[in-house]
Image (tube, rainbow, N blue to C red):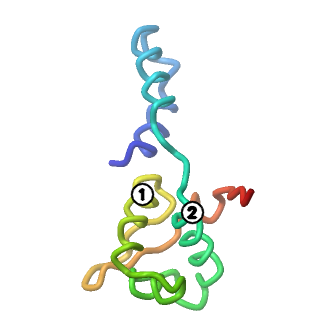
Amino acid sequence: MSKQRFIKEVELFKDKLSPEALKFFEDFKDKTPTGLTELNIEILCYMRENESKFGNCFTSKIIGEGLNTAPKRVSGSLRKLLNLCLIEKNGSAPVQYGLTADGRAYRIDKN
């Protein structure tokens, strides 16, 4: 389970937590990184723009070729997107990834 998914699940029951547990949870939530790197944003944008073209099934190789970067570099960034529940694994051999509803809805500030 990813940290972001854990946070979302606990949010549903936080009114039932003791004051001490609620403080611990809020501290934990504040320390959980959610910001995306530049490559994470490029990957997310690429997947959004090409979702129908690839049937929402992307490999590191497909994304790497699309972004003109090494698939190994893409793989590392995909792990963060997985942990944030913005993408999910759709298959294996080769591992395929697809956007989640959260990934489609995630607001990207390009400042």
Q: Would you say 45 lies left or right of 80 here?
A: right
Name the amino acid type tagged 1. Lys
Residue assigned mark 2: 38
- Please state the horizontal and vertical placement of residue 44, each as a whole percent of the image: 57, 69
Q: Residue at x 39, y 42 (%)?
A: 3
Image quadrant where residue 106 sits = bottom right
Q: Nearer the viewer, residue 102 or 16?
A: 102
Q: Secondary structure at mark 1?
A: helix
What residue is at 42 percent from the left and 10 percent from the top?
18
Give the x, y percent position of residue 67: 54, 83
Observer-nearest residue: 69 or 79?
69
- Decide: is 3 above or below 22: below
Crowding at dot 1, Cα within 10 Å, few <14 / some 14-19 / many 20+, comes out as some
Q: Which residue is mark 1?
A: 80
**Left of 105 or right of it: where is 21?**
left
- Numbered badge on residue 1: none
Q: Measured from the top left, where is residue 90 in percent x and y?
A: 38, 75
Where in the figure is residue 69, as x and y percent of width and height?
A: 46, 82
Residue at image position (45%, 83%) is 64
- At 62% from the left and 65% from the top, the residue drawn is 104
Vertical order, 67 against 86 (above or below)? below
Say above or below: 76 vs 31. Answer: below
Graded by Cα atoms within 10 Å as few (under 14), some (14 to 19) or many (20 or more), the crowding at tag 2 reads: few
Q: Nearer the viewer, mark 2 or mark 1?
A: 2
Which residue, as the protein is rendered here, is positioned at the far top?
Answer: 19
Lower sequence index among marks 2 and 1? 2
Picture quarter with the C terminus: bottom right
Label 2 – label 1 distance at C-alpha: 12 Å
Secondary element under disc 2, as helix, strand or loop, is helix
